[in-house]
Each structure stands twice: as structure tokens, then as C-alpha cells.
Amino acid sequence: MSTLPGALSACKIPAVDAYPQTPGSHFPFSHLNLATAIGRRSVGLSSHSSRKVPVRAVILEEPKSHLVAFLPSLTDRFRLGSLSEDGLSYKEKFIVRCYEVGINKTATIESIANLLQEVACNHAQSVGFSTDGFSTTLTMRKLHLIWVTARMHIEVYKYPAWSDVVEIETWCQSEGRVGARRDWVLKDYANGEVIGRATSKWVMMNEDTRRLQKITDDVREEYLIYCPITTRLAFPEANNTSLKKIAKLEDPAQSSRLGLVPRRADLDMNHHVNNVTYIGWVLESMPQEAIDTHELQTITLDFRRECQQGDVVDSLTSLDKTVSLEPSRTDGQLTNMASKTDKCFLHLLSLSDSGLEINRARTEWRRKPPQQ
């Protein structure tokens, strides 16, 4: 692994109390905490089978550059996040900033999606994956491979307000032979209430050819060590809608917003339009009367084709007539909240010139709560 030296053969590690503590970590840096957990797993022991003790090692003649892997960066010291004790998930706390809230004085769905992306990338950094791309391993960089999103599903039960503190936990795991899965749980840090959940599926793309590629065994071995040993799902209940197929939007659409153009700021490190931009485009064609009286509860997106600078995009929306608008209850073990979905919409993003699908989406809306 890129974060851990091949052997502790000649570097001098100062005492544990020599460095500032990273909030939430048992050692001053999460890399070392993870290294000890992995070491226990590799010999078949439980992550709780040995006592955590301060680590001190003095070995001579190792190049000093190896010490860098163990030192906390300035970012690590100020970031309010850390790996779990077993090293298989990551939690981080965020303060909702004024520019992340909308007209309802609560965080927008785009802001929440950005936080999901941020905590996922910080999780990858904390275990040593590359910072010059989204969670790329050593083998991925050698083969010019990148991760791209195939599907995203987000449910928000309560939107946090400006200055609220949100804690997000994330973890990843394998999803068949061609994909990987990442899940999230969002909590109100003040009371521990689950206010949202999300899940996503990721596939691998060759950065040069822009074609999808199967995940190789070498890449799989590089990230599986950081995944839960047994399957863990953000949506464990049998009747959840995270895997529900999105129906095709039939012509003519009931509302539309035509001629959307990516800005330079919409492009990400992989040189295509960032996932969060698609959410904004999908909502651009929502009927204003629905926006005025309802708030988004659930959004599911299927990504069919990447969008790049210079493309012109049309956003289309229609009511989903196939849905029975009955009260639905989220998993009581997680949220203990009931919600009534009384509007569902289908969405399509397509290229203006060819009509080719970029993205299909489905949204569920509930009536806005009374103003405080």
C-alpha cells in the first residue's frame, strides 16, 4: 500500500505524545492506527484482540523520506474526521456554511451531495490513496484507470440548517466483478438522529480511451483490505427503493429546460462534468409550483454517458404516473421517521444535438414543513 513502508527497517518514530492529536483518533495519526489494525487482521486476529499501546520504534539507517508516511499533515490536524477503530469506515463532521443553504434556510441537495463526495475522498486519502485523482490506487495510476459513478441514490429525512453540525460515516465494498459500492449515513451531530442515507455504484474507466474496464484483481486487492469483511448496507431493509429501476421518460415531457452548458467550474479532476452538476441540471426542469410547496426527499440517478465541456444539454421532467402515492416509512431501526411522498417525477438529461441519454433520474418529494 502506498501509505505504509514496506518494512520498519530503519526509521525513527518519535513517541506518540510528540504530535498533536487528530480529533477522534486513538493515535496522533490515523495511518498508524490503520496499520496496527491491518497488521492484526493479516495474522487472523480480531481488531480487538490486542491492546492498543503507544508505539515507539528506533531503527537505524532508513532514509528520512520514509518518515513522511507516518507524520500527520497539516490537513489531517485540522480535518474533523478519522477512521473507525477497525479501519473499515470513516467519519467526519461538517459545519453547514451560509453558502451551502438555499431559500429554505437549509442545506441544498447539491450541498449535501458535495459533502458526500468530500467525505468519500477524505476517506480515500486517509488510507493513502492518491490525492491527484479521486481515490486512485497505485495500480490504477499505472494503468491510467479512474473511478466513475454509475448510480447514485440519496435520501434526506431532515435537511440541516445553517451552522448545524453534520456527521457523515462512509465505507466502501466490492459490488460484483465490475463495480464497487460506497454507502453513507448522515447524522445530526447534536442529537445523533439519522437525517439521511445514500448509496452509490462505481465502475472503472480508462482515462485515455474513456471506455469502461473490469476491475482487475490487483486493484481489487488494493482496496478490499479497507472494506468491511461482511456486507454492510446503508439501506438494509427489503423494500428500499435504492435499487429500483428508473422508467424511461415518455415524449412529450411535461416541463423542460433546454440548452444547458457546462461551465469551466463544473469540470472535475477527471476532466468531465462533476456528478453534483447533474443533480442541479435535473432539478432545473422541475415545475415551479412543486418547488414552491415541496422539498426533495429522494433522488436516484443512473449515469449513462459522461458529459464534457462544449456539450449542450437538455433537461426534461414529467410526473411518474407508475407510482402509488401511499405513505411510506423509512427503516425504523435507522430513523424511526415516517414520511409521505406525494409527488414523484421522472427526469432525463440528453445531448441537445443527438438526443443521446446522459442521465436518467427519479425524484420523490414531500410537502415542506411549516416555517418555524
Image (cartoon, helix red, strand yellow):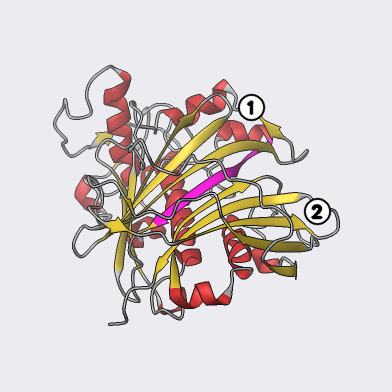
Q: What residue sits 56% from the left and 44% below the top?
A: 151
Q: Where is residue 150? Give x, y as percent.
A: 59, 42
Q: Which mark is residue 355?
A: 2
Query: Which element carries disc 2, helix, strand or loop?
Result: loop
Work out which residue is located at the far right of the displayed protein and give it.
353
Q: Amino acid at mark 1?
A: Lys
Q: Which mark is residue 341?
A: none
Q: What residue sits 85% from the left and 53% below the top?
A: 354
Q: Earlier in the sequence, mark 1 or mark 2?
A: 1
Toward the viewer: 340 or 143?
A: 340
Quadrant in the rendering for residue 166: bottom left
Quadrant in the rendering for residue 15: top left
Is 145 one of the magenta-colored residues? yes
Query: Which element carries disc 1, helix, strand or loop?
Result: loop
Is 66 one of the magenta-colored residues? no
Main SS class of the magenta portion in the image: strand
Q: Which mark is residue 214?
A: 1
In the picture shown, does residue 129 fall above or below 215? Answer: below
Q: Where is residue 104? Give x, y as percent.
A: 41, 79
CA–CA distance in space, label 1 to label 2: 28 Å
Quarter of the image with the C terminus is: bottom left
Magenta range is 144-155
The answer to whether residue 43 of the structure is visible from this angle is yes
Q: What residue sits 78% from the left and 50% below the top?
A: 356
Q: Amino acid at mark 2?
A: Gly
46 relative to 100 in the view: left or right: left
